[in-house]
Image (tube, grey):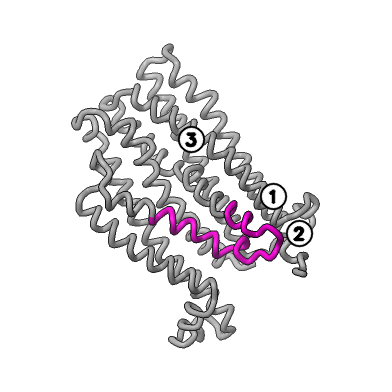
């Protein structure tokens, strides 16, 4: 297993989930909870809006660069001519037009460039600081969702010959999209908590409590759906429990499950300990600021674990699943 291709693959998936997460955080939390308040209170969050807008453009740049690198690595494997030998117009044309991976890459690269133009236009209007969604923002959000959805057509689910592979493909796509909500939204949530920590006396703690409560509920639902879709994926890729120990794919998957289990444990502590204390009427604003600091530290731990999970997912995508390897089409 090569580390560099795994990291590139992790960056493609991570940046795609991150783009969805940043937009979803605005739509699900900032606009409904904070956006209905006075412009003066909304303006307190301008530094946060600037950071999130910057993250959106940075994630888009990572998505474009790593998608090109991913195609280059696949093209190298197809041609067998090495990294530089595969960089000729004829080979690139064959890769883009005569392979399913290449055709999907062409569609995604076109979508990424279109999204870049849309976000550049939105950035000139300071879209993240607006209290309403523009039609262009709606279009950008749907395009981000589509780009993430299309990644499922470039992995094991798309190449599966097992019975019911369409269910596998749909489950894989849903798994990716839900991952953009949790753990994806841990990134913008950590930036939000950091902003609250810095401007603690300018923000109404009641609004902070509403954001924390809503984030906790959506995270809980997302975790349940991730477990469900993950079980479906495991059925189609692993096939049997013993394969978790006996095969390379199973052992890598087991590593991912352990990391996700630790993340869920940290999340449950946040929900049933820190969140309950924060929402308790017995704590004043000074005590709540300390709870925000503790919650922020835990969220950063989850963000670091998410990065580790993405790297593991990168290795999973390069390892043949045991059920695929053993299945012989009739």
Q: List the residue tagged with mark 1.
A: 254
- The quadrant of the picture occupied by the C terminus is bottom right
**Any magenta on residue 166?**
yes
Q: Secondary structure at mark 3?
A: helix
Q: Secondary structure at mark 2?
A: loop
Question: Is residue 129 shown left or right of residue 62?
Answer: left
Mark 3 or mark 2, earlier in chain: 3
Residue 120 higher or lower than 305, as above or below: below
Residue drawn at point x = 43 percent, y = 30 percent:
214
**Any magenta on residue 236?**
no
Asked whether disc 3 touches disc 2, contact meaning CB atoms under 8 Å apart, the reply is no
Mark 2 surroundings within 10 Å by alpha-carbon count, few (fewer than 14), some (14 through 19), many (20 or more): some
Residue drawn at point x = 33 percent, y = 63 percent:
114
Report x, y in % for residue 52.
Answer: 33, 46
The numbered dot on residue 91 is none
Q: 70 or 269, which is in the foreground? A: 70
Number of marks in picture: 3
Mark 3 or 1, which is nearer the eye? Answer: 3
* C-alpha separation, residue under disc 1 versus residue under disc 2: 10 Å
Q: List the residue tagged with mark 2.
A: 247
The numbered dot on residue 218 is 3
Residue interval drawn in magenta: 143-172
Residue drawn at point x = 33 percent, y = 36 percent:
30
């Amino acid at each position: 297993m090569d580390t560099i291709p795994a990291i590139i693959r992790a960056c493609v998936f991570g940046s795609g989930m991150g783009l969805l997460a940043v937009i979803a955080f605005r739509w699900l939390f900032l606009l409904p909870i904070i956006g209905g308040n006075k412009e003066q209170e909304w303006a307190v969050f301008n530094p946060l809006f600037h950071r999130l807008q910057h993250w959106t453009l940075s994630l888009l740049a990572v998505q474009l660069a790593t998608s090109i690198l991913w195609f280059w690595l696949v093209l190298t494997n197809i041609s067998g001519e090495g990294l530089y030998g595969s960089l000729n117009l004829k080979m690139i044309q064959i890769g883009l037009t005569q392979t399913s991976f290449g055709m999907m890459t062409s569609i995604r690269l076109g979508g990424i460039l279109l999204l870049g133009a849309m976000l550049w236009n939105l950035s000139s209007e300071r879209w993240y600081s607006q209290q309403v969604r523009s039609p262009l923002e709606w279009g950008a959000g749907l395009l981000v969702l589509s780009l993430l959805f299309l990644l499922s057509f470039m992995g094991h689910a798309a190449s599966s010959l097992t019975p019911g592979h369409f269910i596998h493909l749909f489950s894989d796509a849903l798994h990716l999209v839900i991952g953009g909500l949790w753990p994806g939204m841990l990134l913008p949530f950590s930036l939000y908590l950091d902003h609250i920590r810095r401007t603690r006396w300018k923000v109404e703690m009641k609004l902070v409590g509403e954001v924390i409560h809503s984030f906790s509920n959506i995270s809980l639902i997302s975790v349940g759906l991730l477990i469900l879709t993950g079980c479906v994926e495991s059925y189609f890729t692993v096939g049997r429990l013993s394969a978790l120990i006996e095969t390379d794919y199973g052992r890598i998957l087991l590593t991912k499950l352990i990391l996700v289990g630790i993340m869920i444990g940290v999340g449950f502590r946040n929900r049933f300990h820190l969140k309950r204390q924060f929402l308790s009427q017995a704590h004043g604003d000074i005590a709540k600021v300390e709870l925000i600091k503790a919650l922020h530290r835990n969220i950063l731990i989850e963000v670091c674990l998410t990065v580790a999970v993405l790297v593991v997912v990168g290795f999973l995508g390069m390892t043949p699943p045991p059920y695929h390897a053993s299945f012989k089409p009739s």
